[in-house]
Each structure stands twice: as structure tokens, then as C-alpha cells.
Amino acid sequence: MLKLAPALLTGFVAMGGWAVVTVKDLPEYFVAGQQYTIEFQVRQHGRTLLSGLRPQLVIESAATRDVVIPAVARSAAGTYAVTFTAPTAGQVQFTIRSGFGNSELRLYPQTVVAVGGSRPAMAARDRGQMLFVAKGCNTCHVNSDLTARPANQALTVGPELGGRHLAREYVVQKMKNPASQIMPDLGLTDAEAAAIAVFLSGDRAAASGR
Ligand code: HEC
């Protein structure tokens, strides 16, 4: 499984490079009309934090035409922030254009609730699946367990993670301390790592636990 990486990587570099976008603190849902600031990082080949880019957030929703909002650089290397107002209640589609070549990250559709509306509780497995894409894992790892995967470019830099039933402790350990030349530590919180581990374990019993 590990031996495929070097040859493929050489190919991708020749194609002009690619980047991993990692969203920080993605809310479980948004409230219509409220302002949000979302931070994200861009890493070339998943490793080198890239400063000096001009990333953009593209917002698609039924209510409005596509909105494109430029992100601003934060002082930390390769870190950007974008501020926007959540559209009316319904589904909203966010895409982050990294500004590095054509590399972009399309998230799962996000839920926008009305002010005072009911707040959907998200099962750990679904949260984990959403974060698997939003953190950039899917940029390097194909995963056949993803439901209605957002249409992102799929690279096979790391092993396929679908149908593997990986032990949760092993997955958390790997995220927190990849000890790898290729897989980065993306700085996930414990709660984020735990949700992704539930998703990758395929553990239905834990799927509704929080
Ligand atoms: C830049 C590419 C890259 C990114 C981004 C990345 N990985 Fe990996 N990952 C790898 C590679 C390459 C390996 C296998 C070699 C190694 O361990 O270094 C790996 C190994 C793994 C393994 C061990 C698989 C096995 O067969 O034992 C798990 C689990 C894993 N990654 C989960 C994740 C998760 C979850 C994320 C997102 C938080 C993530 N990876 C992000 C490249 C990446």
C-alpha cells in the first residue's frame, strides 16, 4: 500500500502541483442572516503552508446567485479567513478556491437554519464524514464509504480508507502524530479527530454517540 506514493507524487508535481485545503472550526450548521468568519489553511502537497495566495470562497444557494468572496491572509503562515453572511434557510454549497493553481475544495452541502429555527443534531459519523472532506483528508485518501462525495479531484497519495473498519484509537493516533514524510499533522481538535475516527471505523454503534 505504501509503495505507490513516490511514483504518483512525481506525476502530480509534474502536473503543476496541488494543495490541501483544511477548514478550521466548521460549524455543524449556520443561522440565516448571521455573519461568520471561517479560517482555513493551504498546504502545498499537504505539507508546506503557502502564504501570499489570494483564495476565495464561493457560496452557492437556492436563494441567491453565486457569491464569490475574497479571503484575507492571517498572520500565521498559510492561513486565511473569509467573512460572509449566511443565506436564507436551506442548503448552501461552499467551495474554497485555494488560489494555488486550480486546486479547490468543495465541501459537503451545509445546513442553514432560520433564526430561532430548530437546530439539527448531527450524528458523529456524519460529522466525521463532513470533516473528512473539510479537513482535506479526501484530497489524499480515496474513500468508498463517502455518501454523495462532493466533486473534488481525487488523488491517491495515501491508502484507500473505505471499508477498512480501522480501529478508532489507531486513526486518532495517526491524525495526531502521523510520523510520516507525506501525511501532515493538520492540527485537528480532539473532538474533530474523534468524529473522523468514528466515520473511518465504520462503527454503527458509535455513530450516534457524541
Ligand atoms: C498529503 C496527503 C495526506 C493527507 C492530507 C492525509 N493523509 Fe492520511 N496518509 C497519507 C499517506 C501517504 C499515508 C500512508 C503512509 C504514511 O503513513 O505516511 C497515510 C496514512 C493514513 C492512515 C493509515 C492507513 C493505513 O492503511 O494504515 C490513516 C488512518 C490516515 N492516513 C488518515 C487520514 C486522515 C483522517 C486525514 C485527514 C485528517 C489524512 N489522513 C490526511 C497521506 C495523507
Image (cartoon, rainbow, N blue to C red):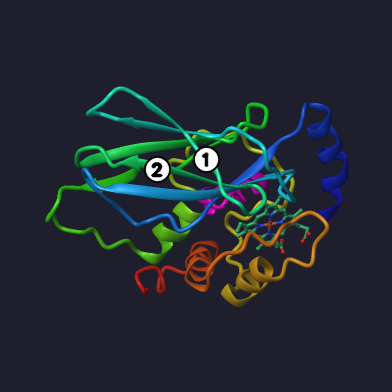
The residue beneath circle 2 is 83
The magenta region covers: 132-145
Point out residue 168 in the picture as x, y percentages from the top left corner: 57, 73
| Residue type at numbered disc 1 | Val
- Residue 206 spot, x, y in % from top left: 41, 73
Q: What is the residue that sits farthest to the bottom in this orientation? A: 169
Q: Position of residue 88 (x, y in %)?
A: 20, 38
- 21 up-or-down from 62: above or below: below
Question: Regarding mark 1 in the picture, which secondary structure is present there?
Answer: strand
Front residue of this view, candidates 88 and 1: 88
Q: Residue at x 52, y 73 (%)?
A: 190
**Quarter of the image where the C terminus is located:** bottom left
Q: Residue at x 35, y 49 (%)?
A: 36
User: Does the magenta-highlighted stretch encompass residue 88?
Assistant: no
Residue 187 percent across, percent down from the top left: 61, 64
**Residue assigned mark 1:** 72
Q: Is residue 120 left or right of residue 42?
A: left
Q: Nearer the viewer, residue 89 or 199?
A: 89
Give the quadrant of ligand 1: bottom right
Q: Amino acid at mark 2?
A: Thr
